[in-house]
Image: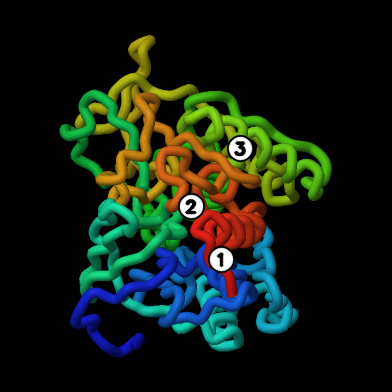
């Protein structure tokens, strides 16, 4: 089916939208429960090849610099990565995901973009660029990569320099000879600040002072961080990134940056000028590039007709691991809220598969 165009509406029990970490985990657990791909369920992925968002990461992101790549259930990442930490993450992880899809015969249909999901009584109608699908339930695993977030600031349209987002970054050498303003206090911001500051002049601004974390980030700390994000989505509030509650690890790279003086963080500016930025106290700074490392938002526009959102902008989540949409229990969101990082993606995929099939009274 992966090389064909869907010519007519295909009826399935479950459609999994997205084949990143959470989507593959969900598909694997549907398999374990006895459901057959292309017969009982189907995985759709908009990317032309396996790898989820990893295939689009910047070339300098290697296995030695990336946050831990968590194993997918049933097949260890280490079997494919080898011992070379200099391998690009954009190559190693897609290779692993491709092997995983083949090993468990998940038969992902790609490229297939879901345009909209609508309620049709007992079933859900999924409109894609490959045709129409009808399902009793969906597991949405679209993640965030397709929805980069750049906050609005006065004067942004007047800036004569270059405006970029983390998603657009390729290599630090692209900025040689230009003054680059890094905006954001997350791990990606720190990584790009480190690389770019080694080839050109940089400045760094964040909305709040960075929180540095000393000591290891163990599994218990990870669970606490995920629990804090889960509490928000159960209350119907917009989720925060897991890293926002974990703090930034003080690594040897961070210590080196401190010695080079590139961690001189400035508070957030109040407006953007044609040549740079201006703070509320009147200070200005001329820059050539504004690089927004301000994260991503959940890519859920295709679910808008289901009216899952609250007035707060969040989605009230229920279920054992907060993957079930309270307003429509036929919809599970994995890669949203507490499962938006690899820390929670695997467990969320398993929970969604079990809870959705139980709610729909599907037994194999």
Q: Is 335 in front, or is 133?
A: 133
In screen coordinates, is 45 left or right of 361? Answer: left
Badge 1 or badge 2: first in the primary sequence: 1
Decide if residue 190 is in sight here.
Answer: yes
Residue 312 is left or right of residue 87, and the answer is: left
In the picture as drawn, the residue positioned furthest to the left comes out as 158
Confirm or deny contact between disc 3 and disc 2 (CB under 8 A).
no
Proximity of marks 1 and 2: CB atoms separated by less than 8 Å = yes
The image position of residue 116, as x and y in percent, is 25, 56
Residue that lies at the very extreme toward the top in this rendered image: 281
Label 3 residue SS: helix
User: For mark 1, what is the residue?
Assistant: 26
Residue underneath mark 2: 332
Disc 3 marks which residue?
230
Apparent side of residue 143 relative to residue 241 in the rendered image (left or right): left
Q: Could you say which quadrant of the image residue 110 lies in?
A: bottom left
Dot 1 falls on a residue whose secondary structure is helix
Number of numbered labels in the structure image: 3
Residue visible at 51% across and 65% down?
A: 23
Looking at the image, is mark 1 or mark 3 nearer the viewer? Answer: 1
Q: Quadrant of the N terminus?
A: bottom left
**63 lies above or below 124:** below
* Residue nearest the viewer, comparing 170 with 26: 26
Q: From this view, report whether residue 146 is shown above or below residue 132.
A: above
Which mark is nearer the camera, 3 or 2?
2
Res. 172 visible in picture: no
Residue at 33 percent across and 12 percent down: it is 282
* Place of residue 305 in the rendered image (x, y in percent of width and height, measured from the top left): 25, 45
* Mark carried by residue 175: none
Residue at screen point 48% across, 52% down: 332
State the separation of the CA atoms marked 3 and 2: 14 Å
């Amino acid at each position: 089916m992966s090389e064909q165009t869907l010519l007519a509406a295909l009826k399935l029990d479950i459609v999994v939208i997205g084949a990143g970490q959470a989507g593959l985990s969900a598909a694997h657990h549907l398999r374990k429960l006895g459901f057959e791909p292309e017969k009982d369920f189907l995985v759709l992925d908009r990317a032309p090849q396996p790898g989820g968002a990893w295939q689009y990461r910047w070339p300098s992101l290697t296995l030695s610099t990336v946050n831990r790549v968590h194993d997918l259930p049933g097949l260890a990442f280490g079997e494919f990565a080898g011992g070379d930490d200099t391998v690009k993450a954009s190559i190693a992880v897609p290779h692993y995901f491709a092997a995983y899809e083949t090993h468990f015969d998940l038969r992902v249909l790609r490229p297939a973009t879901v345009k909209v999901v609508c309620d049709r009584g007992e079933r859900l109608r999924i409109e894609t660029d490959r045709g129409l699908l009808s399902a009793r339930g969906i597991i949405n695993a679209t993640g965030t990569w397709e929805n980069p977030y750049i906050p609005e600031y006065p004067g942004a349209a007047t800036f004569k320099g270059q405006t970029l987002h983390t998603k657009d970054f390729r290599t630090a050498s692209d900025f040689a000879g230009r003054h680059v303003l890094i905006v954001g206090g997350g791990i990606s911001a720190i990584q790009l600040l480190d690389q770019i500051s080694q080839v050109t002049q940089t400045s760094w601004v964040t909305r709040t002072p960075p929180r540095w974390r000393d000591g290891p980030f163990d599994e218990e700390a990870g669970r606490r961080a995920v629990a804090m994000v889960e509490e928000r989505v159960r209350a119907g509030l917009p989720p925060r990134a897991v890293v926002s509650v974990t703090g930034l690890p003080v690594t040897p790279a961070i210590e080196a940056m401190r010695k080079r003086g590139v961690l001189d963080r400035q508070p957030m500016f109040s407006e953007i000028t044609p040549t740079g930025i201006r703070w509320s106290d009147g200070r200005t700074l001329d820059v050539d590039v504004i690089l927004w490392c301000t994260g991503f938002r959940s890519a859920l526009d295709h679910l808008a007709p289901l009216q899952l959102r609250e007035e707060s902008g969040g989605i009230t989540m229920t279920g054992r691991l907060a993957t079930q949409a309270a307003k429509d229990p036929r919809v599970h969101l994995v890669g949203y809220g507490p499962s938006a990082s690899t820390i929670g993606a695997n467990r969320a995929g398993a929970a969604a598969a079990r809870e959705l099939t139980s709610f729909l009274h599907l037994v194999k």
